[in-house]
């Protein structure tokens, strides 16, 4: 149930608004002046505040300013019988969602309240989602190999240098790429990810550079490619070792000239993109076997960051397990399970060929199949599956 606060020095206005809003099934509190309203606002969590502007002790604009400084997601709707366009603009600049004149039109009032509630919900959901994404993208580890990776990220992220990330599947190469983007000057621009291994070779050029309508049989409309989508931001080419030689040549040209041409087109399009690439292959071996262009390799590998396999950073396993237990509990809406020390030691001894991805799957399996605590017997019974 939405929680609404009415701040107004006129009892009749408060009573009328409360009656209307409670009829709509909202929970409503009242405050007779700005000081009381601000105190209630600080003590409680409200979705929407209806605030009069002209009040004794503290006017509504001052209440609004002080409330905005609290950093809550509450939406303010300012109400006044003496409102002007200048007043409405000033209220909006200070953070108000909307402005309504007294006496308020019933339909206008309810519509504004619903819209404010929608925005309040959207803001809260967005913050929750960002926290969830940030938590899942967090790089966990204090082992020497991981500290080297983190040190490289700290030094390289603020620059425009291209980075080639190497390491086995499931080791967390994409987390390194996201960290590089997050801490770069391009962080407010998009990061576009392309898994080169998942796109058929005949479609990779269209995926990267886009195509014009009619350029091939199924090209029924123009398509904007990943390079254009990432303009101003970062393009992450995952598993670049699986890219076809013809696509490699075009990527090389794009890196050299900062221009691309859509498939079936002849217009050159300027692009400003920082390219980060990743691979689980030995690209030098691929070069020797004529499957990867040496000139492209040197363009991409201004900075090399190697992500170690989990077997080389076993000291990080307890930290990773604790993180996964918390993440899974948040996803399921439960309290995190506790893992016994003997079970943790057992996990540290296993051969993690699937790296962090495999460890995360094992922890989720243990959470689902084990009792209130994850015991050594649980670990032996369920963690060894697939080992």
Image (cartoon, helix red, strand yellow):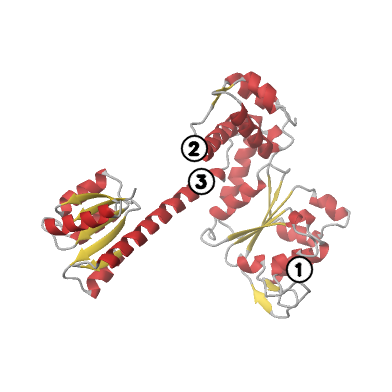
Mark 2, other Cα within 10 Å: few <14 / some 14–19 / many ≥20: few
- Is 102 situated left or right of 240 in this image? left
Instruction: Quadrant for residue 98, please give it.
Output: bottom left
Q: Residue furthest right?
A: 289
- Residue situated in front as seen by the camera: 57 or 266: 57
Spot the residue most to the bottom: 266
Residue behind mark 2: 333
Q: Tell which circle, 1 or 2, labels the residue nearer the N-terminal end.
A: 1
Dots 3, 2 in contact, CB < 8 A: no
Q: Is residue 97 above or below residue 303?
A: below
| Residue 271 image offset from top left, x and y in percent | 63, 71
Q: Distance between the residues labelled 1 and 2?
A: 47 Å
Q: Which numbered disc covers residue 132?
A: 3
User: Measuring 68% from the left and 22% from the top, which residue is drawn there?
Assistant: 380
Of the numbered discs 3 and 2, the one sitting upstream in the chain is: 3
Q: Can residue 182 be seen in this view?
A: yes
Q: Do the residues labelled 1 and 3 touch (CB within 8 Å)?
A: no
Q: Distance between the residues labelled 1 and 3?
A: 37 Å
């Amino acid at each position: 149930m939405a929680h609404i606060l009415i701040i107004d020095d006129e009892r009749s206005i408060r009573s009328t608004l409360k009656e209307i809003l409670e009829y709509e099934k909202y929970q409503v509190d009242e405050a007779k002046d700005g000081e009381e309203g601000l105190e209630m606002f600080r003590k409680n969590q409200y979705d929407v505040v209806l605030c009069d502007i002209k009040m004794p002790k503290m006017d509504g604009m001052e209440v609004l300013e002080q409330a905005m400084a609290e950093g809550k997601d509450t939406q303010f709707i300012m109400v006044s019988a003496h409102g002007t366009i200048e007043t409405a603009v000033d209220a909006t600049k200070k953070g108000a969602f909307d402005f309504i004149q007294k006496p308020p039109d019933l339909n206008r009032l309810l519509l504004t309240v619903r819209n404010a509630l929608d925005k309040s919900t959207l803001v809260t959901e967005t913050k929750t989602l960002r926290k969830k994404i940030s938590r899942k993208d967090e790089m966990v580890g204090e082992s020497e190999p991981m500290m080297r990776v983190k040190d490289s990220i700290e030094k390289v992220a603020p620059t425009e240098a291209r980075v080639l990330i190497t390491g086995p599947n499931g080791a967390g190469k994409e987390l390194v790429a996201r960290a590089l983007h997050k801490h770069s000057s391009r962080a407010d621009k998009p990061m576009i990810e392309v898994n080169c291994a998942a796109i058929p070779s005949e479609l990779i050029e269209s995926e990267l550079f886009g195509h014009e309508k009619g350029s091939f049989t199924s090209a029924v409309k123009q398509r904007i490619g990943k390079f254009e989508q990432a303009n101003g931001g970062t393009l992450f080419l995952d598993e670049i070792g699986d890219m076809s030689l013809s696509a490699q040549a075009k990527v090389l040209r794009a890196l050299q000239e900062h221009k691309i041409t859509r498939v079936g087109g002849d217009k050159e399009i300027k692009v400003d993109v920082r390219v980060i690439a990743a691979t689980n292959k030995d690209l030098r071996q691929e070069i020797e076997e004529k499957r990867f262009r040496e000139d492209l390799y040197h363009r991409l590998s201004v900075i090399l960051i190697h992500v170690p396999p989990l077997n080389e950073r076993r000291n990080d396993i307890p930290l990773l397990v604790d993180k996964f237990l918390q993440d899974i509990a948040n996803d399921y809406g439960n309290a995190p399970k506790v893992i016994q020390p003997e079970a943790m030691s057992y996990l540290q001894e296993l051969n993690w060929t699937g790296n962090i991805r495999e460890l995360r799957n094992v922890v989720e399996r243990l959470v689902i199949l084990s009792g209130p605590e994850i015991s050594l017997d649980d670990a032996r019974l369920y963690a060894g599956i697939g080992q």
